[in-house]
């Protein structure tokens, strides 16, 4: 669990189109909530 002021670990993923995205760079300097959808159960 991250604490206030901690640096977010590097996270990469794919968009719904399959393109790679660097999530860490996308939210740098901003508040963010990252939701992960793991698919249909």
Image (cartoon, rainbow, N blue to C red):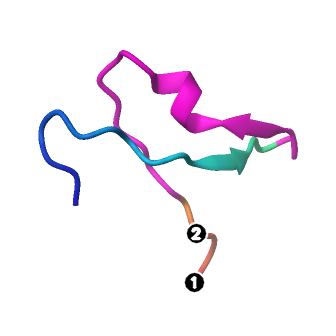
For mark 1, does the 10 Å Cα neighbourhood hold few (<14), some (14 to 19), or many (20 or more) residues?
A: few
The crowding category of the residue bearing disc 2, from other C-alpha atoms within 10 Å (few below 14, some 14 to 19, many at least 20), is few
Residue found 57% across the figure and 26% down from its top: 25
Q: Residue furthest bottom?
A: 41
Q: Main secondary structure of the magenta part?
A: loop
Residue 38's spot in the image, x, y percent?
58, 69
Q: Residue furthest left?
A: 4
Q: Which residue is mark 1?
A: 41
Tags 1 and 2 in contact by the CB under 8 Å rule? yes
Find the distance from the CA under tag 1 to the CA under tag 2. 8 Å
* Residue 37 x/y as whole percent: 55, 60
Q: Nearer the viewer, residue 25 or 38?
A: 25
From the viewer's perspective, tell me whether residue 17 is left or right of residue 40: right
In the rendered image, the vertical position of residue 1 relative to residue 31, given as above or below: below
**Residue at (57% x, 48% y) in the render:** 11
Q: In the image, is 11 to the left or to the right of 28?
A: right
Q: Is residue 5 left or right of residue 34?
A: left
State the SS at label 1: loop
Question: Where does the magenta region start and end?
Answer: 17-36
Q: Position of residue 9 (x, y in %)?
A: 44, 48
Residue drawn at 50 percent across, 56 percent down: 36
Is 21 inside the magenta-drawn segment? Answer: yes
Residue tagged 2: 38
Determine the image quadrant of residue 22.
top right
Quarter of the image for the C terminus: give it: bottom right
């Amino acid at each position: 669990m991250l604490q206030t002021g901690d640096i977010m670990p590097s996270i990469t993923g794919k968009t719904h189109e399959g393109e790679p995205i660097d999530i860490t760079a996308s939210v740098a300097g901003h508040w963010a909530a990252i939701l992960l959808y793991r698919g249909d159960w």
